[in-house]
Amino acid sequence: MDLETGVSECARPDRHQKILRTALLQRRAELRKAWRHLLTVECLKQLGSTAPYVAAYLSGKDGFRDWQMLSLRQWTDCDASLPEMLISIGLGENIACRPSAGVPAVFTCANFKKLSGKHRLEALCVRYRCPLNIGLESEAEIAEELLRQLMVADRTRLEAEAEFDVDDVLLKLNLIAVCAGTKRDLRFLDALNYFFELPQRSLARLGRKPHFLAGWLCLYAQLLCAPDW
């Protein structure tokens, strides 16, 4: 069969955005149906009084709060715990933050890489207790390193169904989700898409940490509804 060949015109930028938005909303519809396989009844029980709000949001209509409006220009403190903050951001709730009395010491990517898994997790939990701080320009190198670890070492372990540190992986997924929302960087969103697409048997292990898992799913749902990627 003879095929007529020629140079096709590239789709207009507004067409690209429409295609992307349609795909993301389709994924949001998938998440609306699939989240209960990840965040089980047992997991929800461990969320306590937050559980009904998480379930209602993940099962509900598309909802979006512009995280770019939450982007910080200076270091911020909060009274809520890190898991509480992640879920609150994911649910689009008002975030109770205040300017920090002091700025933490510089945390270089080189020093971060030297930490063992346990100490790396502790350092992230302390430094980003208010997770919006990961979006600060001063934290850009750390954010890039978290993305690299997820898409190289962590990805390899999960694909091979090897053991991995659930706390470590989930915290990184939450933090890069915050980065994706504040920076509108598709690389961070692509990483979240990849992990959501892993086989059910791999994702099931994330249920060991319901609060971090709920935070990630709510943050991901928010991102899928963002209109301006």
Image (tube, rainbow, N blue to C red):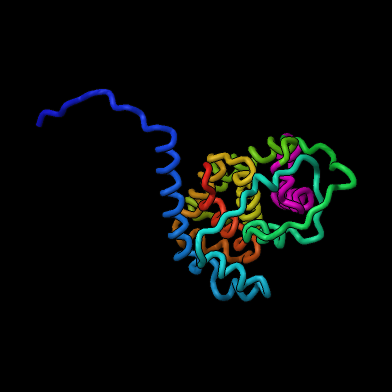
The residue drawn where x is 52% and y is 47% is: 227
Residue 144, picture quadrant: top right
Residue projecting furthest to the left: 1
Q: Is residue 119 visible?
A: no
> Which of the image's four quarters has the N terminus?
top left
Is 6 left or right of 80, judged from the image as shown? Answer: left
Query: What is the x, y in percent for residue 165?
Result: 63, 55
Name the foreground residue: 36 vs 15.
15
Residue projecting furthest to the right: 101
Q: Is residue 226 on the magenta stretch?
A: no
Vertical side of 170 occupied by 51: above or below: below
Is 156 left or right of 149, judged from the image as shown? Answer: left
Magenta segment, principal secondary structure?
helix
Query: What is the x, y in percent for residue 222?
Result: 57, 54
Name the foreground residue: 85 vs 69.
69
Is 148 left or right of 83, judged from the image as shown? Answer: left
Q: Which residues are magenta?
A: 110-135
Q: Is residue 133 on the magenta stretch?
A: yes
The residue drawn where x is 69% and y is 36% is: 140
The residue drawn where x is 60% and y is 49% is: 177
Name the foreground residue: 171 vs 47.
47
Query: What is the x, y in percent for residue 221?
Result: 54, 57
